[in-house]
């Protein structure tokens, strides 16, 4: 049995659902799924991981006292070596972007981020390049292989198994020259754009910062993330971290709602892989209207309040 | 089923729309067809929409000055029609012509005097008071950054400029064409979009009508070619028309750049339109406090003649397609950078690439043709946007006169301009003319 | 106390990318500096202007045409530059080795900047590999930096609303994010000055770098085709809202 390492991420004490898609993609008869859990009580996660075929949970405990990407990456490398893991899969998430390249650098191993298709036997993946204008098939050579999967590209399928939990304490080297001072949260990003199933983005049509409240009101009912086009960010209506597109975040949600966004090439680069695109725009000729699944020619200031009302009643 | 109209206008840009408007006002039942989804979406949308008076001929100056009056009186011109998209705005910034070896400004001044264009001669000091960011050294002749001479230090100063308080630009050229369409519709005109003309039908030396790509046939005794960069292709569809033109048109690729103005200079609200032959550029404000930098097509720059269909499909290849090229970005921005030394030039090109419908002598062809009932308003060469409302009136009167029996080739139609009161010999724009060597052979017209 | 800024020569994000052969693109398009590298240079120039660095050196692995990007880098404040020439595409495993070797040979780094990722290959890893080869600490998506002789304090935007503050001992590697600054683009006089600045060319083949056992090869490149057939939703605002809810519920199955 070849052990496959899965770098597990948590949010609010729960395993991020995208991890289960990752486990589903990695599963095969001749493979053993090993979940690597860093500085989170792994016993709580055991049952959820077992449901998706994980048979070993490595409970990595570091002395870093909270988030420390340098220490966490070193700990993951040590845990991989301890468990004979040469293949590691993680998410192309904020955490994955920090840890996976650090792991790959330490192991001098190939790494492809943002994979939309993975063949673990052939070490061959697909990922987008040139701002989503091309899909590259990349083959990797080496002794270790690190994969950063794009969230939600594989739908989770249950495959119950029983897992053992192994403790793995890790003490970081001193004098690495890297020290965490603090982590601040300002509460602006309650939903992670890159991993959200539903994203509602606003653009020029929103006209000002205050009107983004209309998007947040709808998003709240859907547990959706709110994004923005470059125009909205350039105008200072919302922070850059909300920008979807070429020079912003690339997203892959099930539903992408583009509200008052014309749909420049640069914006498409960030959301073109969304499953269903719904566009709301007063301009029937906006580029997005010709490259979406559903379009509404209409005034967002009429439609969003109506949508919020409809969503509120669905929830009830 | 064949539909019948009095006149078909091919193209709903800023030239085609006013012709439809004026013909409708005269009682013609018109049908405008355009291959794009809405009015003004073609090369009109890519126009810099400059409104300025300096042309190389007196008639050119008079024509442009007549055009001013339409832009200044836009709502009246449109007969107060409502457009759901709002009205285009004429931004009367004033217009500065730098006295340089790149322009025959002495002629322009003479023409201004003859026509009665308001202007003021400015010294360098007076220009700097108005526009403190400028460096008024002479950089002539215009060169490209690839040429080592481009980088040489200047030694001489310029000699001031001519400033017209009337002049500027229209903020949204596509919208202006849309406005005229709505005005025309209010007078009974019909517009059909996503309608590509594939054939011009004729019999016995008379035009019969057009055939669209989907097979639809539309008949009319009058067909007007206002197809912009596609004009030569449309002329070639009509029997004998292209062959009968001494002056031909073709499509010229043209790049316009957007470069942010220096941070401490409120160019958008306090800046002017400026024609600067010394560096081969013209500029006007654009939203986002940007300089819109157009090129006056200096001799050292390559001219890229392209197939308009390939160009718009992005198929022409580097320098021939609809993508900005880094070389030209640097050429135009660095030229302006010499004039405005605090201008910061981003690495990524930003701007518009579109086509000029260019005639052999850069003067338009406003004329009948060798095919009865077939007319053309073509070869606008990047310099006729400002004249479009006047062209609409003039073409409509020309068409009406010819349809009533005038032999325009023998006795050229005389057009009386409404505002300046001058009479223009429309034969000046004849397809049969010899190349006019008084022309600037550039966008300056 | 040199600042090194690693830059990459990439296709303009607005360029039309056409695939040639199995795994290459038509390169007759506009190429320019990777946009994140602009933030790195702007910050390097700011730090130097505060009197804290001796020299800013731009370093690039690329084809001969990449000199253009180094020229841009020097116009934006680099004092000189190094072009590690190659005529092939290289993955980040080789790139990091080449950059590390060039920097090590050139001088004593204080801060090494990179962009947080390149917009062409979008690998998001060269900065980490470079740091590993040089044995240095590294932070990515840096949006604020305070530098002193002992090191740097950086703020990194991990995700919307989450900022990590790290202290790194110098020398260190900093992956510049978009939030770091507004790029300070060159004026004409800056460009004139940059023309006299030197570009040192070294051949990748002559670099003393070990041949790694690991690698990433692009086997195939295909255009990403997007086929959607837009359907209109019409009616009153309430009708439209109901239709959207229906799509979310029954088609996308997200409610």
Image: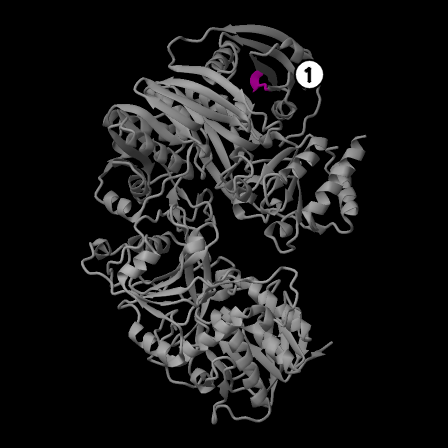
Q: Which residues are magenta?
A: A1-9
Whether residue B35 is visible, yes or no, is no
Instruction: Determine crowd level at label 1: few under 14, some 14-19, many 20+ residues with C-alpha closer than 10 A.
Output: some
Question: In the depicted view, which residue is nearer to us: C56 or B56?
Answer: B56
Q: Residue at x 38, y 84 (%)?
A: B434
> Is there any visible trace of residue B172 in the rendered image?
yes
> In which quadrant of the rendered image does the N terminus of chain A lie?
top right
Please say which color scheme the image uses.
one colour
Quickly name the residue at label 1: A48
Image quadrant assignment for residue B211: bottom right
Asked whether C236 falls inside the magenta stretch, the response is no
In this picture, residue A138 sits left or right of residue B194: left
B408 or B188, which lies in front? B188
User: In the rendered image of this protein, does residue C25 appear above or below residue A83?
Assistant: below
Where is residue B84, by image quadrant?
bottom right
Residue A32: x, y in percent?
Answer: 60, 16
At horizontal 36% and vertical 48% (from top left) the residue drawn is: B345
């Amino acid at each position: 049995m070849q052990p496959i390492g899965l770098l597990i991420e948590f949010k609010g004490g729960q395993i991020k659902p995208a991890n289960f898609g990752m486990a589903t993609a990695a599963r095969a008869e001749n493979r053993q799924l090993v979940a690597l859990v860093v500085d989170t009580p792994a016993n709580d996660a055991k049952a959820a991981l077992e449901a998706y075929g994980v048979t070993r949970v490595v409970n990595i405990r570091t002395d870093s006292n909270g988030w420390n990407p340098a220490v966490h990456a070193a700990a993951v490398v040590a845990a991989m070596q301890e468990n004979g893991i040469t293949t590691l899969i993680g998410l192309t998430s904020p955490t994955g972007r920090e840890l996976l390249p650090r792991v790959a650098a330490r192991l001098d191993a190939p790494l492809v981020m943002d994979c939309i298709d993975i063949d673990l036997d052939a070490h061959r993946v697909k990922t987008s390049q040139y701002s989503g204008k091309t899909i590259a098939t990349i083959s990797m050579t080496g002794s270790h292989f690190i994969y950063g999967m794009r969230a939600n590209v594989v739908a989770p399928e249950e495959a119950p198994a029983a897992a053992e939990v192994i403790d793995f304490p890790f003490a970081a080297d001193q004098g690495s020259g890297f020290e965490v001072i603090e982590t601040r949260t300002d509460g602006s990003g309650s939903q992670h754009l890159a991993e959200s199933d539903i994203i509602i983005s606003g653009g020029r049509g929103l006209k000002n910062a205050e009107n983004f409240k209309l998007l947040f009101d709808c998003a709240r009912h859907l547990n959706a993330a709110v994004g923005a086009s470059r125009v909205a960010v350039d105008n200072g209506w919302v922070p850059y971290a909300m920008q979807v597109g070429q020079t912003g975040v690339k997203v892959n949600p099930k539903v992408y709602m583009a509200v008052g966004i014309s749909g420049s090439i640069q914006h498409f680069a960030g959301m073109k892989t969304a499953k269903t695109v719904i566009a709301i725009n007063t301009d029937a000729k906006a580029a997005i209207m010709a490259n979406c699944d559903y379009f509404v020619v209409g005034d967002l200031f009429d439609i969003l309040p109506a949508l919020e009302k409809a969503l509120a009643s669905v929830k009830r | 089923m064949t539909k019948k109209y009095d006149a078909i206008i091919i193209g709903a840009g800023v030239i085609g729309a006013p012709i439809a408007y004026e013909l409708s006002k005269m009682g013609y039942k018109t049908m405008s067809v355009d291959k794009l989804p809405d009015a003004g979406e073609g090369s009109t949308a890519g126009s810099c929409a400059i409104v300025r008076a300096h042309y190389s001929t007196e008639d050119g100056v008079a024509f442009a000055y007549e055009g001013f009056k339409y832009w200044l009186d836009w709502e009246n011109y449109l007969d107060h029609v409502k457009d759901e998209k709002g009205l285009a705005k004429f931004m009367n910034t004033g217009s500065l012509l730098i006295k340089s070896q790149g322009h025959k400004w002495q002629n322009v001044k003479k023409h201004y005097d003859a026509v009665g264009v308001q202007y003021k001669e400015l010294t360098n000091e007076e220009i700097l008071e108005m526009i403190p960011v400028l460096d008024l050294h002479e950089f002539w002749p215009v060169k490209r950054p690839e040429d080592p001479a481009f980088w040489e230090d200047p030694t001489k100063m310029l000699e001031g400029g001519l400033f017209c308080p009337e002049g500027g630009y229209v903020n949204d050229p596509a919208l202006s064409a849309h406005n005229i369409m709505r005005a025309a519709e209010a007078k009974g005109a019909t517009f059909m979009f996503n309608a590509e003309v594939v054939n011009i039908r004729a019999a016995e030396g008379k035009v019969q009508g057009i055939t669209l790509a989907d097979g639809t046939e539309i008949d009319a005794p009058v067909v007007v070619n206002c197809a912009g960069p596609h004009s030569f292709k449309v002329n070639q569809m009509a029997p004998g028309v292209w062959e009968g033109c001494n002056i031909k048109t073709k499509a010229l690729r043209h790049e316009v750049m957007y470069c942010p103005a220096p941070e401490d200079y409120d160019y958008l609200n306090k800046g002017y339109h400026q024609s600067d032959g010394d560096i081969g550029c013209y500029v006007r404000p654009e939203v986002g406090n940007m300089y819109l930098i157009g090129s006056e097509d200096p001799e050292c720059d390559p001219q890229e003649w392209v197939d308009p269909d390939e160009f718009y499909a992005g198929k022409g290849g580097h320098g021939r397609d609809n993508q900005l090229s880094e070389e030209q970005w640097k050429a135009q921005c660095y030229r302006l950078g010499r004039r405005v030394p605090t201008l910061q030039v981003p690495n990524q090109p930003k701007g518009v690439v579109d086509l000029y419908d260019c005639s052999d002598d850069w003067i338009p062809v406003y004329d009948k043709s060798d095919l009865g009932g077939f007319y053309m308003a073509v070869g606008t060469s990047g310099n006729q946007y400002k004249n479009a409302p006047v062209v609409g009136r003039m073409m409509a009167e020309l068409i009406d006169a010819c349809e009533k029996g005038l032999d325009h080739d023998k006795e050229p139609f005389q057009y009386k301009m409404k505002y300046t009161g001058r009479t223009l010999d429309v034969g000046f724009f004849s397809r049969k003319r010899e190349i006019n060597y008084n022309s600037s052979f550039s966008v300056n017209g | 106390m040199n600042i090194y800024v690693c830059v990459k020569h990439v296709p303009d994000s607005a360029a039309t990318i056409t695939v040639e052969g199995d795994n290459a693109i038509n390169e007759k398009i506009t190429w320019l500096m990777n946009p994140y590298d602009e933030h790195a240079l702007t910050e390097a120039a700011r730090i130097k202007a505060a009197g804290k660095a001796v020299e800013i050196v731009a370093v690039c692995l690329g084809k001969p045409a990449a000199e253009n990007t180094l020229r841009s880098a020097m116009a934006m404040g680099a004092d000189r530059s190094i072009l590690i020439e190659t005529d092939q595409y290289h993955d980040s495993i080789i790139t990091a080795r080449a950059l590390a070797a060039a920097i090590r040979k050139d001088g004593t780094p204080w801060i090494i900047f990179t962009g947080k990722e390149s917009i062409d290959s979008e690998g998001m890893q060269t900065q980490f590999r470079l740091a590993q080869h040089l044995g240095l600490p590294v932070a990515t998506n840096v949006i604020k930096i305070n530098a002193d002789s002992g090191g740097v304090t950086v703020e990194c935007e991990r995700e919307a609303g989450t900022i990590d503050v790290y202290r790194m001992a110098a020398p260190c590697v900093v992956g510049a994010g978009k939030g770091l600054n507004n790029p300070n683009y060159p004026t004409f006089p800056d460009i004139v000055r940059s023309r006299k600045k030197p570009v040192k060319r070294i051949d990748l083949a002559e670099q003393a770098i070990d041949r790694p056992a690991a690698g990433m090869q692009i086997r195939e490149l295909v255009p990403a085709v997007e086929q959607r057939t837009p359907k209109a939703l019409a009616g009153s605002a309430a009708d439209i809202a109901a239709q959207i809810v229906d799509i979310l519920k029954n088609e996308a199955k997200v409610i």
